[in-house]
Amino acid sequence: MLRLTRSSIRNEAASWEAAGVELPKFDYDTVAKNTLEKPEWVHFGAGNIFRGFVANAHQKLLDSGAADTGIIAAETFDFEMIDKVYKPYDNLTLLVLMNARGDFQKKVVSSIVEGITADKTREADDQRLTEIFENPSLQIASFTITEKGYSLTGPNGQYLGIVEKDIAGGPEQPIHAMSIVAALAYKRYLKGAYPMTFVSMDNCSHNGDKLKNGIVTIAKEWAAKGSVEAGFVDYLLNEQLITFPLSMIDKITPRPSETVQAALLEQGIGEMDVIVTSKNTYTAPFVNAEISEYLVIEDKFTNGRPALEQAGIIFTDRDTVNNIETMKVTTCLNPLHTALAVSGCLLGYTLIADEMKDDTLRKLVEIIGYKEGLPVVVDPGIISPKQFLDEVLKERFANPFIPDAPQRIATDTSQKVGIRFGETIKSYVRREDLDPADLTAIPLAIAVWCRYLLGVDDKGEAFTLSPDPLLETLQGHLQGVKLGDTSSNVRAILEDEQLFGVKLYDIGLGGKIEGMFYELLAGPGAVRSTLEKYVK
């Protein structure tokens, strides 16, 4: 049985290749030595998207000789990731890419040459991170720590408890990711105020601005308390030295699949157990992911960068990054996801791929994308919106090996409808040749969301709604509403300009959505029959 270690891929290379696994082509020992002496890239957030996309992109450079140092992975949140899936496997990852036909492409990724924690109590790790940031060679610190990782405040606008502690304690014992990175940047400032670039690669709008705000806010608070010099804040704000480019990332890397684990075992690859950490992270020595991937980065680096364009990553200007983000979030992916999510929950689906086999639901998202979305899409110029949409609908959503659930995507829908549907509606309002009242599938998706909020499926049975910060308020408007009712206070939801970013009743859509809502509410089976009626 093969075990994922350096000695195994070196000494049993023929067996790995016989199992259909592509192995690294570069001299690991030389790259590790170079990285130790002149680190160029540290990445915070050691999870699946990093291992399955970012690290693999860098491996392509190492394999071709376009890079000669590896990546140092640092974990700020879940230290068990390093202890349980990095160290026991020599920092290797078995990447399994899966297409909709069930073909697996397997590859050992070994571009990560160190896995360390940002745990101040682990002296060696703490010392190594300091060394890395004090070295003039460091070019970039990148991040996949999720959108929450950048947030310093709670819903009430006050600093989180750990952030308050970090501010009071200064750069000595930071706990929050932003404080940890600010403290390391301070070490770099003291050593020589060397240039470098901080790159957020998280899937959220204006990610670089969020990262900058997090680090600079901590630095300013420390400076105000006298914990650091005012010159440190100036250093972070000097764009000749420090930059925070925007990026757009898109690749589904779900939690490890037991189906994939079983397939690997059958091929003679052992010790691939799925691990659930005490912080509830699902991880494994392997990462399963879809083949499609996009990473677009604002080309704004102060101390050099890896030549990642050779690995398919796009470098461009800030406006183009924003336009690609807008294309994806308002037209070509996210609105379709939300429409499938709320419809799927009502119709009893647990997999997006299964929904794509349902002719009615497939037609619904095709109309939202092709017929209603593309006429007003923001075209970024370097990626074709039509091709992107084709890939989403024909390959990505239909892939049964990417176990993405409508219940997950339905989370926080109240925070998303304004961007995912409201922006297209606003574009129709602005265009003289288009009338928002002509829209059908987008109003229908909004009506389905209102129907979803009742927490009763199309059979008339109760189901659990996904978490949403406005759930209590929204459900309050629909209190007492039952299947078959022909009146309700749904208008209170549809009138809320804060939700949709537009006055739906003023533009001729409020009444239309309300009518659809009552059709969906008519009784058991009404969700299915109403969807069929409007998408036929």
Image: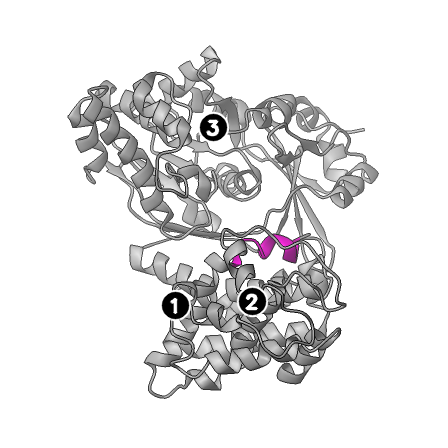
Whether 454 is drawn above or below 510: the answer is: above
Whether 346 is drawn above or below 258: the answer is: below
Comes first in the chain, label 3 or label 1: 3
> What residue occupies the far bottom of the structure in this picture?
433
Between disc 2 and disc 1, the foreground one is 1
Residue at which label 3 appears: 76
Q: Which residue is drawn at 46% across and 17% down?
A: 125
Specify the label residue 497 is tagged with: 1
The three-letter amino acid code for the residue at tag 2 is Leu
List x then y, in percent, for residue 71: 47, 31
Mark 3 vs mark 2, CA separation in Å: 33 Å
Q: Which residue is drawn at 30% across and 55% down?
A: 318
Regarding mark 3 in the picture, which secondary structure is present there? loop
Which stretch appears magenta? 404-413
Comes first in the chain, label 3 or label 2: 3
Residue at which label 2 appears: 336
List x then y, in percent, for residue 465: 63, 55
List x then y, in percent, for residue 521: 66, 74
For residue 508: magenta?
Answer: no
The three-letter amino acid code for the residue at tag 3 is Thr
Specify the label residue 268 is tagged with: none
> What residue occupies the far top of the structure in this picture?
123
For residue 412: magenta?
Answer: yes
